[in-house]
């Protein structure tokens, strides 16, 4: 019954490194960092590796369109060596607004492009000649570096098609905003189907689920955390991949209310219901956090990850989640 965590630096990279060191000392199995518009995630992992001894470190997740497969594999090998074999390479397709507006690339066939990308990265990590894809073509081979064919690759997925692909070609799947019922009813069956396509079982496959968490003492504090979390989730309720997943998960009413708000921030925030947040999060007492993590495990998450929520005490939450 392992537990992971998400620690993404905000303004202070030094503070994030302290928290990862704490998570390592508390016995967390893995720590992931996100890749958005601030600190560069793979470079951050180098700092995390230097500051820790046992905890696995990983990206949660880095978009595949930010690097060629050759660069991604080369960086992964370096980080895995630096961390003593503790890297978990989390890959995702991200979203059109990020890929096109930030990186000048295009998402055309997300599932096919992820399949192609992972195949090339795996071949390079294994010391093999990479296959030639339709989007990415390379003859890159590692030189003077021991192959790492077993370096774990986790794939971010929301839709059944991407979930099946994660099961087929990945070592794990990374989930965000997926409530336990969705994990049980959609994620696990789709991943199992993908594993069966590859002639494998679910044994050893990691289902990594981010659980927004905060240990608070009062109902007023919990309401404040919920309000701050709603503000952070506004972007996700605007993105097509997440909207489709949320509707599939039974939160179509929330999506409709969000759209009816017509861009008015408070209206959009209130559309993100307590019903959704109650299922998604572990915010409240330590017992409530424990219950939330167990709820994810029972649904099929093999590695529920404490993700400190805004307005919460990060250190207290990490200590409670580890216990």
Image: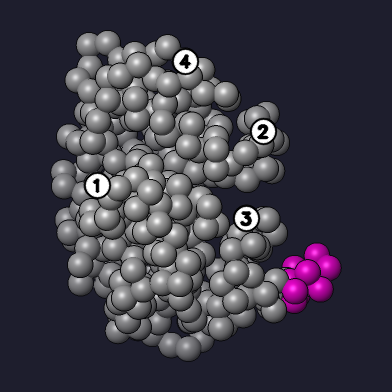
Measure the alpha-carbon separation of dots 4 and 2: 19 Å
Which label is found at residue 138? 4
Q: CA distance from mark 1 to mark 3?
A: 28 Å
Q: Is residue 169 visible?
A: yes
Residue at the image position 31 percent from the left and 71 percent from the top: 297
Q: Which of the two discs, 4 and 2, labels the residue nearer the N terminus?
A: 2
State the SS at label 1.
Answer: strand
The residue under label 1 is 56
Q: Please, what secondary structure does the residue beneath circle 4 have?
A: loop
Query: Which is nearer the N-term, disc 1 or disc 3?
Result: 1
Judging depth in this view, the residue of 83 and 123 nearest the camera is: 123
Q: CA distance from mark 3 to mark 4?
A: 29 Å
Q: Are marks 4 and 1 in contact (CB under 8 Å)?
A: no
Marked residue nearer the N-terminal end (2 or 1): 1
Q: Decide: is 89 above or below 157.
A: above
Query: Which secondary structure class fits the magenta region best?
Result: helix
Numbered badge on residue 235: none
Q: Residues within 10 Å of mark 1 (few under 14, many from 20)?
A: many
Stretch of the chain drawn in magenta: 256-267
Instruction: Locate residue 61, reporting x and y percent.
Output: 45, 45
Work out how far the residue at label 2 is from the one at label 1, CA to CA, in angstroms. 32 Å
Q: Quadrant of residue 288?
A: bottom left
Residue at the spot of label 3: 241
Q: Which residue is mark 2?
A: 106
In percent of the image, x 22 and y 11: which residue is there? Answer: 144
């Amino acid at each position: 019954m392992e537990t992971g965590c998400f620690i993404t630096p905000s303004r202070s990279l030094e503070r994030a490194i302290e928290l990862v060191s704490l998570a390592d000392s508390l016995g967390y199995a893995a720590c992931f960092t996100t890749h958005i518009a601030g600190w560069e995630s793979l470079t951050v992992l180098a700092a995390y590796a230097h500051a820790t001894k046992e905890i696995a470190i990983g990206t949660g997740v880095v978009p595949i369109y930010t690097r060629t497969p050759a660069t991604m594999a080369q960086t992964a090998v370096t980080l895995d060596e630096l961390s003593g074999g503790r890297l978990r390479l989390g890959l995702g397709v991200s979203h059109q607004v990020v890929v096109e507006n930030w990186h000048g690339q295009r998402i055309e066939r997300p599932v096919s492009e992820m399949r192609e990308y992972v195949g090339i990265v795996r071949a390079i990590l294994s010391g093999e000649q990479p296959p030639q894809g339709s989007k990415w073509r390379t003859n890159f081979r590692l030189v003077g570096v021991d192959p790492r064919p077993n370096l774990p690759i986790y794939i971010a997925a929301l839709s059944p098609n991407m979930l099946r692909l994660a099961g087929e070609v990945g070592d794990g799947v990374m989930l965000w905003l997926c409530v336990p019922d969705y994990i049980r009813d959609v994620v696990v069956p789709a991943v199992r189907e993908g594993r069966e396509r590859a002639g494998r079982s679910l044994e050893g496959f990691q289902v990594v689920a981010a659980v927004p968490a905060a240990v608070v003492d009062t109902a007023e504090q919990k309401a404040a955390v919920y309000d701050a979390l709603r503000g952070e989730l506004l972007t996700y309720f605007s993105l097509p991949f997440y909207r489709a997943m949320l509707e599939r998960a039974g939160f179509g009413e929330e999506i409709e209310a969000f759209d009816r708000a017509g861009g008015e921030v408070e209206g959009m925030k209130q559309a993100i219901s307590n019903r959704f947040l109650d299922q998604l999060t572990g915010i409240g007492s330590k017992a409530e956090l424990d219950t939330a993590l167990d709820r994810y495990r029972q649904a099929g998450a093999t590695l529920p990850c404490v993700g400190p929520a805004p307005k919460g005490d990060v250190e207290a939450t990490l200590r409670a989640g580890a216990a």
